[in-house]
Image (cartoon, rainbow, N blue to C red):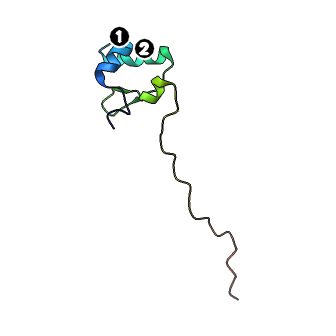
């Protein structure tokens, strides 16, 4: 999984910044897609840099459907 995202050194080289808030500012100006992780650091996929679509799994579609038939009334 290490080759899925840029390393910290690669992120510094790309943005020219070491401070995470400044990296985020630069990434926004560049228009590059990124995520902010739980500790507030930007995470950039290698796919975004290479200009290809990231292989992010989609949410699975539901395998069941609700039964909308009315329940027969007991009289």
Using the image as rendered, state which of residue 7 and residue 35 is in the foreground: 7
Tag 1 and tag 2, C-beta contact below 8 Å: yes
Quadrant in the picture for the C terminus: bottom right
Using the image as rendered, state which of residue 39 and residue 54 is in the foreground: 54
Horizontal side of 70 relative to 13 (left or right) equals: right
- Give coordinates of residue 12: x percent, y percent: 32, 16
Q: Residue at x 47, y 18 (%)?
A: 28
Q: Residue at x 58, y 65 (%)?
A: 64
Q: Nearer the viewer, mark 1 or mark 2?
A: 1
Q: Residue at x 37, y 17 (%)?
A: 23
- Give coordinates of residue 69: x percent, y percent: 69, 73
For residue 63, above or below residue 57: below
Which of the labelled discs sits on residue 26, or is there none? 2
Q: Residue at x 48, y 39 (%)?
A: 55
Quadrant in the picture for the N terminus: top left
Q: Which comes before the other along the chain, label 1 or label 2?
A: 1
For residue 33, above or below residue 71: above
- Secondary element under disc 2, as helix, strand or loop, is helix
Which of the labelled discs sits on residue 16, or is there none? 1
Using the image as rendered, state which of residue 46 and residue 17 is in the foreground: 46
Horizontal side of 28 relative to 74 (left or right) equals: left
- Secondary element under disc 1, as helix, strand or loop, is loop
Query: Alpha-carbon neighbours of circle 2 within 10 Å: few (<14), some, or many (≥20)?
Result: some
């Amino acid at each position: 999984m290490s080759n899925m995202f840029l390393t910290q050194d690669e992120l510094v080289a790309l943005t020219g910044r070491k401070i995470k808030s400044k990296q985020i500012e630069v990434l926004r100006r560049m228009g590059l897609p990124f995520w902010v992780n739980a500790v507030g650091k930007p995470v950039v996929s290698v796919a975004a840099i290479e200009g290809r679509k990231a292989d992010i799994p989609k949410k699975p579609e539901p395998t069941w459907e609700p039964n909308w038939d009315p329940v027969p009334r007991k009289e």
